[in-house]
Amino acid sequence: MAAKDTPLRWDRRMQQRLARGEAAALGELYDKFASLVHSLAHRVLDDDEAADQVTREVFGYVWENPDHYDPKQGNLRSWVARLTQRQAVHRLRQTEARAYAERGEGTAEELEQKVRQASVAARADYIVTSMPTPLRQALELAYFQRRDYRQTAADLGVTEDEARRRLRLGLQLLSTANTRPLEGSSPPGPHGYGRAL
């Protein structure tokens, strides 16, 4: 049971260290989550420079607002992923609106369709990064390494029934990416983050 509490304790300690202004804490957080933040932002924006900028903005926001993290709402990883998704969607909306205005082509509906598609992709990525590790591992083996449930079971050292259960639950979670409204999909507040988390 104590091992299960470890990530939550780490999250709380990290939040406290950030609130005290410990630069080393920000460095540790960056080392742990920078690749997640950059990949989520890139998934939405399809642009390395823009993803780099969103990464800087997200970690800047975390540094300035560690008190906005609420452990009751989920783990620190999920909070950082939500911030990233919101900021990336906000930046996409701004960039595409500017591009449509400059070219004089396209419609508001086309812009919103593009934002919606990127939002669904970001939500799917967010769901995968937030799901329990056993489900995520099973999906990653099945999707990225093209393993069937038997191979997934062997790779994970579980029964075939357990592998099927994990894959089914993971896919059920992913199916909500296109059916639930995306958090922060309405125009965000200052700096693209909407209301405080």
Image (spheres, grey):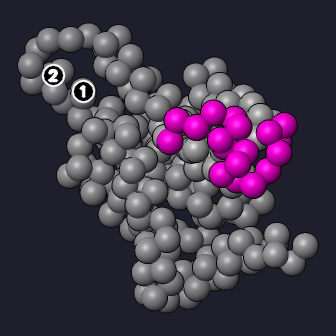
| Residue at 18% over, 30% down | 98
Is 90 colored magenta in this rendering? no
> In the shown orientation, is residue 17 left or right of residue 41?
right
Q: Quadrant of residue 171?
A: top right
| Residue at 50% over, 42% down | 145
Give me the disc on residue 101.
Answer: 2
Kindly state the secondary structure of the residue where label 2 is placed.
helix
Kindly state the secondary structure of the residue where label 1 is placed.
helix
* Position of 114 relative to 4 (above/below): above
Q: Residue 138 at what x, y percent from top left? A: 66, 44
Q: Residue 93 at what x, y percent from top left? A: 33, 32
Q: What residue would you read off at disc 1?
A: 97
The reply to whether dot 2 and dot 1 touch (C-beta < 8 Å) is yes
Span shown in magenta:
145-162
- Residue 131 seen from this side: no
The 10 Å Cα crowd at callout 2, few under 14, some 14 to 19, many 20 or more, is few
Structural distance between the alpha carbons of marks 2 and 1: 6 Å
